[in-house]
Amino acid sequence: MSEPSGEFQLISRLCRGLRNSRRTLLGPGDDCAVLAVGGIKQLITIDSLVEGVHFKLEWFTPEKLGARALAVNLSDIAAMGGEPAACVIDLALRDNLAKRFAERLYVGLKRAARAVKVDIVGGNITSAGQVMITVALLGRARRAILRRDGARGADEIFVTGSLGDAALGWRILDGRLSAPDVARGFLVNRYISPSPRLSAGAALAALTPVPAAIDVSDGLAGDLRHMLRASRVGAEVDARLIPLSPAYRAVAGDDLKLALSGGDDYELLFCMPGRYSERELTRRLGVPVTRIGRIVKPGAGLRIRNLPRPVDLRGLRGWDHLRQSV
Ligand SMILES: [Mg+2]
């Protein structure tokens, strides 16, 4: 489940006073909920892609849109260290779209599901003013569960892959940014076809002590703040350590605004004591891992040191307001 801060606070308000049964091991507030079902820890998450909010139709083939709808949910399972199992799909379609659109979207969904051994077990189709694809995904935790609220004082903060690429890709597609061809292809692909870090999440769940983790769907600053709030700690991030791809550097130079707040990266952000080096974590997770800072005492909030140039984080996506539009 992914939610910019404003939506996060709204969900918290709506869920106030919930009285769930003991079957619910972990309720609202993390990437997935956790249920005790027949001796296993069942994970459940839901997310939507909404036309005009998360994407424009002309940016995608229907097949790639279908695959992306599953990928954003897979990322939430990865962030819990779990293994995906089955999904149901709700598809809202505009009346003027051909049936062929839905058929091709399902081709992409089925291909993506097969690749990660997820069963598609049902769904619903409705008509609406804009296209919306909602996937509810079930999974299970084979090992420990990675939670947002597990960060502790003196933990180090790590992130997989590189940040800000997808946000640049979005702006290139939207015509707000131009880029050399090589960088363009890489950045656009990072937005269109994210790679949920399922095997990295499973490897994290095998570490001792168990890390705290969240997926970076709303931008590093926003998602780290979700984790700090849940764990009741502060953090210091060294901007010089934030992992940037060569394509990001080629297009944005030393402007870290999108690396901090861009969203749609679907990398994993995790906190744990400095027991493992970056190299060892990279080996175990099978994806580049970078240490970007450390957890500090409660009340310190999020401090970002050594920014090469000032970035105004207020009002950015994933920071403190509802996202209104593309
Ligand atoms: Mg998430």
Image (cartoon, rainbow, N blue to C red):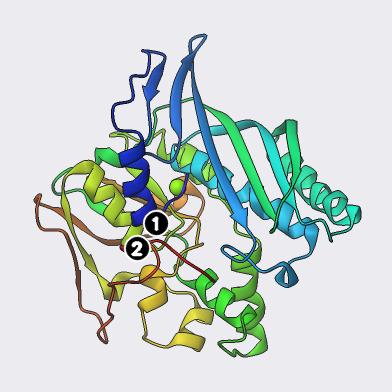
Amino acid carrying label 1: it is Pro
> Which residue is denoted by mark 1 in the rendering?
4
Q: Badge 1, how many Cα within 10 Å: few under 14, some, many 20+?
A: many
Whether the residue carrying mark 2 lies under 8 Å from ligand 1 is answered with no
Question: Residue placed farthest to the top in the image?
Answer: 38
- Say which element carries label 1: loop
- Say which element carries label 2: loop
**Residue drawn at the location 18% of the way across and 42% of the way down:** 152
Seen from the viewer's position, the closer of residues 1 and 302 is 1
Q: In the picture shown, does residue 285 fall above or below 278?
A: above
* In this rendering, position of residue 294 left or right of residue 69: left
> Which residue is denoted by mark 2 in the rendering?
321
Residue 284: percent from the left, percent from the top? 45, 45
Residue 257: percent from the left, percent from the top? 36, 78
The part of the image, by quadrant, that contains residue 192 is: bottom right
Seen from the viewer's position, the closer of residues 48 and 247 is 48
Amino acid carrying label 2: it is His
Which badge, 1 or 2, comes first in the chain's sequence? 1
Quadrant of the image for the C terminus? bottom right
**Residue drawn at the location 74% of the way across and 36% of the way down:** 124
Q: In the picture shown, does residue 69 fall above or below 23?
A: below
Residue 231: percent from the left, percent from the top? 22, 42
Residue 12: percent from the left, percent from the top? 32, 40
Seen from the viewer's position, the closer of residues 221 and 296 is 221
**Marks 1/2: CA–CA distance:** 7 Å
CB within 8 Å, label 1 to label 2: yes
* In this rendering, position of residue 230 left or right of residue 59: left
* In this rendering, position of residue 233 left or right of residue 177: left
**Residue drawn at the location 16% of the way across and 48% of the way down:** 233
Seen from the viewer's position, the closer of residues 286 and 176 is 176
Q: Badge 2, how many Cα within 10 Å: few under 14, some, many 20+?
A: some
